[in-house]
Image (cartoon, rainbow, N blue to C red):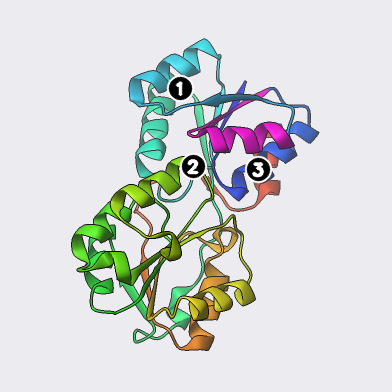
Amino acid sequence: MIWIMAGTADSYQVIEALVSLNKKLIVSVTSKYGKSIVESKYPVKVYQGKLDSSKMKEFCVDKEIEYIIDATHPFAEDASINAIATASELNIDYLRFERDNINLEQYSNNFLIKVKSYQEAAQEASQYKNIFLTTGSKSLDIFAKEVDNYQNRITARILPVIKYLKKAYKIGLKPVNILAAQGPFTTEFNQAAFKEYKADVIVTKAAGKTGGLEEKLKAASQLKIPVIIIKRPEIAYPVCYHHIEELIEYLEG
């Protein structure tokens, strides 16, 4: 049995490829929203819920997992670290499938402000008047703590999911400062959004090409709006593939 840890556009590429090869697999996601997407697209078993280290071991033994394909978000650090440890302990093949990152060196330091954490990003962002967040709902409370008068200064682009909207409202964001939309977004869409909300700075994560980072950077660059970018966690993946053909070749070998 192959276990695909999903949650990104990249994971859908893996699922589609393995379904076409009639591989026996199970997919895990952390949210109901993620489960609904996978089930609507592919005829696969889907487990929904968060797995800590001990639960991962139980899951792998119970499902007789032979391969773990980690296609989680680059910022899902705990999930990846736990999966690596679980695979090592149970002598299971761990394979990371990760979107290609973007070369950030092509952008000037005046335009691109690189930080290591959400808190550092929030501290940098607090120096600007109108802040446009594209980092999701999980980090909203951090920005609320660091930014004075955040209710009138922060615009958050989040998924149109009830629990995420509830969190934004609970923190104190006004409906006018919430852009609920499902990506990926084009450069033109980003430009229109940045203009509409009069953004003075954009905050994003270094999520890679399929995460829409390139389109955000292009839009902001053309509008001469600085971007604060949170760098990826440094995870020591034992094996990492960037192309689906290489991953399949390994599994077929």
Q: Nearer the viewer, mark 3 or mark 2?
A: 2
Q: Amino acid at mark 3?
A: Tyr
The image shows residue 12 at horizontal and vertical percentages of: 65, 43
Q: Is residue 183 left or right of residue 156?
A: right
> Label 2: which residue?
162
Q: Do the numbered discs 2 and 1 sit on residues whose CB atoms are within 8 Å? A: no
Depth check: give the residue in front, 93 or 213: 213
Circle 1 residues within 10 Å: few <14, some 14–19, many ≥20: few
Number of the label disc, if any, that sits on residue 91: 1
**First-in-chain label (3 vs 2):** 3
**Residue at the (68%, 31%) spot, across then down:** 39
Secondary structure state at the residue bearing disc 1: loop
Q: Amino acid at mark 2?
A: Ile
Q: Nearer the viewer, mark 2 or mark 1?
A: 2
The image shows residue 171 at horizontal and vertical percentages of: 29, 51
Depth check: give the residue in front, 198 or 16: 198
**Residue at the (44%, 65%) spot, across then down:** 176
> Label 3: which residue?
12
Please state the extent of the stretch shown in magenta in the rendering: 25-41
Q: So how many labels did they put on this image?
A: 3
The image shows residue 5 at horizontal and vertical percentages of: 53, 34
Depth check: give the residue in front, 228 or 33: 33
Secondary structure state at the residue bearing disc 2: helix
**Residue at the (55%, 79%) spot, across then down:** 218
* Occupied quadrant, residue 145: bottom left
**Residue at the (34%, 19%) spot, across then down:** 54
The image shows residue 16 at horizontal and vertical percentages of: 73, 39
Secondary structure state at the residue bearing disc 3: helix
* Occupied quadrant, residue 85: top left
Q: Amino acid at mark 1?
A: Asn
Q: Is residue 126 above or below residue 237?
A: below
